[in-house]
Image: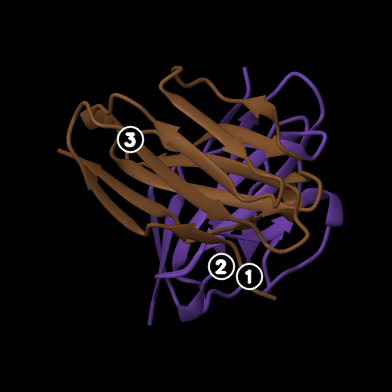
Amino acid sequence: AQRVTQPEKLLSVFKGAPVELKCNYSYSGSPELFWYVQYSRQRLQLLLRHISRESIKGFTADLNKGETSFHLKKPFAQEEDSAMYYCALSHSGNTPLVFGKGTRLSVIA
Amino acid sequence: KAGVTQTPRYLIKTRGQQVTLSCSPISGHRSVSWYQQTPGQGLQFLFEYFSETQRNKGNFPGRFSGRQFSNSRSEMNVSTLELGDSALYLCASSLSGRAGEQYFGPGTRLTVT
């Protein structure tokens, strides 16, 4: 069965500190992995996807198939990074998305 | 271009009633997916419609149904409401159903009393 696990419900870091939001998945095939973000009073939106191997707003995520992980990282947290972050996977990049339960990131000034 | 819209934004219903939620996708988008978001279960996929046909279905009881019209607008219906149906219902649209190309709406907050 497909499953996405985000072990931390809440992560608090100080501004300027490194951030790592953990995501582990279980899937028998080759999934596509995504990170979605929801800022306060805004819609859920795509942050980045593993196939793009890009950095968005300073965030990066590397797919580790051996450890079945897709952790989200940023070297220096900013206050505007405070939001709810969801890790998600899909089969071959198609709907549906399977979401983790999310991690709330709080960046403290 | 206008984003995904959902109506109504808030809804209060009584147990046993039925409810219909509406989703208008971004112009040109043919795929509409629905998700249920609850504190306990998180975001769970309900179903996806593409060109008026249900293409994928999640693991929800038959009380949850949906449809899509020729203009790509979609509705979902929940019959015989239960307290556990209280949730935020999100819809997302995309051109073809690619997961990374979905745009989410603001959601409809359903409260069942």
Determine whether label 1 and label 3 are within 8 Å by CB. Answer: no
Quadrant of the image occupied by residue A63: top right
Q: Position of residue A26 (x, y in %)?
A: 64, 25
From the image, state the color of chain A: purple
Residue beneath the point at 40% across and 21% down = B63
Callout 3 secondary element: loop
Look at mark 1 in the image and give the residue it sits on: A75
Image quadrant containing the N terminus of chain B:
bottom right
Please give the name of the residue rendered at 52% of the width and 79% of the height, measured from the top-left corner. Answer: A78
Query: Tag 1's secondary structure?
Result: loop
Q: Would you place residue A79 above or below residue B112 in this image?
A: below
Q: Which residue is mark 3?
A: B40
Q: Is residue B50 left or right of residue B57?
A: right
Query: Based on the displayed image, in which of its 4 quarters is residue A60 positioned?
Result: bottom right
Q: Position of residue A99 (x, y in %)?
A: 56, 39
Residue located 40% across and 70% down the image: A41
Give the amino acid type for the residue marked by disc 2 in the picture.
Pro
State the residue in front, A24 or B102.
B102
Q: Provide the residue designation for mark 2.
A: A18
**Where does the image place residue B5, in percent across and percent down from the top left?**
53, 62
